[in-house]
Image (cartoon, helix red, strand yellow):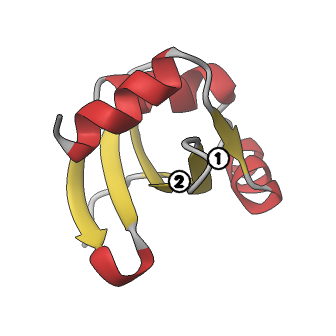
Amino acid sequence: MSKIGQIQALVRNGLYYLTEHADNEAIDEDFDIYDVEYGILNGKIRRSWPKESKCEIVGVSLDNRPIGIVCRITRAGKVRIITVYEDKPKR
């Protein structure tokens, strides 16, 4: 199974959690947990950091805003969501 497939399967089964930082960033960007879930489930991996086992997923929120999520799969087999942000185009 692909990395994105693994992450999406874990999220579908509720095996994920947001760090305090990710929760605060989501609130600041006006996203809720359902936006984060939806963004992962419809998203794709844009880039990854193999040494840290992290990846950046980009997708859309429930209200169709671009969302970025940085996460990793823990040794316990859960998705740890490290940060969440609105994926605004760079100027």
For residue 25, above or below residue 17: below
> How many numbered discs, if any?
2
The residue under the point 48% across, 16% down is: 12
* Cβ–Cβ under 8 Å for marks 1 and 2: yes
- The N terminus: image quadrant: top left
* Nearest to N terminus: mark 1 or mark 2: 1
- Write down the quadrant of residue 53 in the picture: bottom left
Amino acid at pointer 1? Glu
State left or right for residue 91 relative to residue 52: left
Q: Is residue 65 visible?
A: no
Residue 74 to residue 9: above or below: below
Report which residue position mark 1 lands on. 29
Residue at the (41%, 30%) spot, across then down: 39
Task: Please tell me which residue lies in front, 57 or 26.
Answer: 57
Q: Which residue is mark 2?
A: 85
> Does dot 2 land on a helix, a strand or a loop?
strand
Q: Name the element at disc 1.
A: loop
| Amino acid type at image mark 2 | Tyr
Neighbours of disc 1 within 10 Å: few (<14), some (14-19), many (20+): few
Cα separation, mark 1 vs mark 2, equals 6 Å
